[in-house]
Amino acid sequence: MMNVIPVVELEDLKVKLGRREILHGITCRLGVSGTGKAIGLLGPNGAGKSTLILTLLGFLRPSAGRARILGVDCAHSVGDARSRIGYMPENDSFIGDMTAVAFVRQMAELSGLPSEAALEKAHQVLFHVGLGEARYRELRTYSLGMKQMAKLAQAIVHGPELVVLDEPTNGLDPAARRRMLKLIVEMKNEQGMNVLVCSHLLRDIEQVCDEAVIMKDGAIVHHCDLEQERRSNRSFVELEVTGDDRRLRAALPEIGAEGVSEGFGRWRIVLPPGVDVNAIWTLVGRQQLLVRKLTHRRDTLEEIFLKAMGHLAQTPGEAGLEVGQS
Amino acid sequence: MAVYKRGYRRYSGPLTGRWARFLVLPRYAWRRLYRQRLVLLLTIVSFVWPMLCAGFIYLTNHAELLQGLDREFREFIQVDGRFFSIFMYVQAGFAVFLAALAGPGLIAPDLANNALPLYFSRPLTRWSYALARLTVLVGMLSIVTWIPGLMLFWLQVGLAGGSWFTANWSLGAGMVAGFLVWLLILSLVAMASSAYVKWRVVAAAVSLAFFFILSGVAEMIDNVLRVRWGHIIDPAWAVNQVWRALLGVTPTEGPGATASALALAVIVLLLVVVIERKLRPVEIVS
């Protein structure tokens, strides 16, 4: 059997800042090394996301337990771990009086690239993130969006196995945000990099991540495989029809589905695996019903997040599942 | 193919060794430092005195040129410990101003721009970062201190012959060691002020003030308490005392070379602690 190395592996990890314990014994395994997947780290302010990232980078030492990145202990083999990581911090981090190309080249050389290769990669990566034309400008003259891109460039210039992005879309306008998310998706899909994204923006995480971890009060309260959620949620359908829908319940088993009427023509239907939504269209057409609304009802990450935070008793998807089971 | 057409691909080539990586920061810093006109100008000006000293050495080794001079004066102008100590005082002064000019540009911008997390997220420890910054200053100041000093020493050896070297090799070694002690203190002071004050000009002023204030306080202690040990807290005085011992020149009144060396060691230790506390990728408020 192949030895699977998780991207992040935490074993009863406890971290203290001063005398206050911030992370309370977290244990989890996230992602698989070399698969080019993105992991989202979510949580409200003070949940411990940044502390976890700083611990993974070796900036903070665990008071107990272990943290490993790509199989390397973050506290005892800091150099090894860091040589395989690219980090994009949340706040402004750069050297103002350097041009973007000099800055990125210096960072590449610090990561171990020979001088010539570092220069070449600096040019390449700056074009890649859309700063090609501005690469000879000093960083202090950059706009906020350009600085974010420059930070991303320095994080990936050396081709790390894991890129840690702390609030990558912070302060970006919609177009720049879209571009940033596109770059993240490219990083994992085309370059095969693993990405750890820490963000408050659930939609960003939902859009680019394959896994999500929700933290609260220094602990992990939910860990979900977003890809699996996406797949499973496809089986829940919300339907709204006009016309006599009394025979619909009896007709649903024809396509292997089950459903419950909520009155006024509203239905919640659970489709069996392998049956897609077109089957509903056909069935409803045969019943001579007029469809007013037909949507896949999937749990959004927001709903999963709200449930994890204790603000929702159950997600709509779970409610749908109960319908299916009844 | 043009870079913009090539697209980005992950780097998969060979990596450099630890030392090459360590030297990246000094290389970039030196390049930036010598772009500052004032630094370049002061560096050039600081070569004037070594040139004059070279002329002096040439003169003392050419008896025919000194024929018309008074015998006492001819005996006075010797290349000995006193000569090298005078050379060192002047160059040490240049080094103070160069350190104050160049030092603040090393750490202060990294702190002001929050660049430390970027450095420390790479295989670079806090100690190697600090050592790299120290290398920048020591390297830059070496150009105007012990390197020209050693060249003068070898010039004298070349002109006076092997017998002079056998009798005076300790002058060369003492000068290099003495300068290195001074450069270490200067660099640490400049780094400490740069680590705590984000504005370059203020950091430069703090760096200079450190020496003047300690010198003033030392004088005050001596005068108020009617003692001589107060000077031990003045690094310039203490280093002078150490130099005199290394070059075999009569020491000035006050604590001896060993006590001065110990005082300098304590100052170095304190400065290292001060710098260590500030150079962190994240600030933790307990």
Image: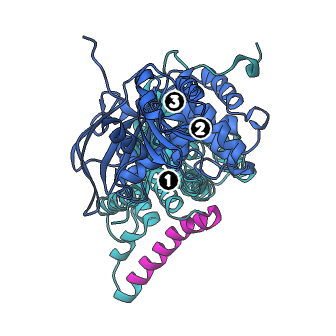
**Helix or strand or loop: what does disc 1 sit on?**
helix
- Residue of label 3: B161
Residue at mark 1: chain: B
What's the residue type where badge 3 is placed? Gly
Q: Quadrant of the C terminus of chain B?
A: bottom left
- Residue of label 1: B187
Q: Quadrant of the N terminus of chain B?
A: top right
Residue at mark 2: chain: A
Q: Which residues are magenta?
A: B199-221
Question: In the rendered view, does A107 fall on the left or right side of A68?
Answer: right
Q: Badge 3: how crowded within 10 Å, few (<14), some, or many (20+)?
A: few
**Helix or strand or loop: what does disc 2 sit on?**
helix
Residue extending farthest to the right is: A133
**Disc number at residue A152?**
2
Front one among B68 and B20: B20
* In this rendering, the label closer to the viewer, 1 or 2: 2
* In this rendering, the label closer to the viewer, 3 or 1: 1
Q: Colour of chain B?
A: cyan
Image coordinates for residue B159, horizontal then vertical, percent: 58, 32
Front one among B46 and B120: B120
Q: CA distance from mark 2 to mark 3?
A: 62 Å
Q: Which chain is blue?
A: A
Residue at mark 3: chain: B
Image coordinates for residue B46, horizontal then vertical, percent: 66, 50
Q: CA distance from mark 3 to mark 1?
A: 36 Å
Question: In the rendered view, does A74 fall on the left or right side of B108?
Answer: left
What's the residue type where badge 1 is placed? Ser
Front one among B244 and B144: B144
Q: Looking at the picture, do discs 2 and 3 lie on one chain? A: no
Q: Looking at the picture, do discs 3 and 1 lie on one chain? A: yes
Q: Badge 1: how crowded within 10 Å, few (<14), some, or many (20+)?
A: many
Q: CA distance from mark 1 to mark 2?
A: 34 Å
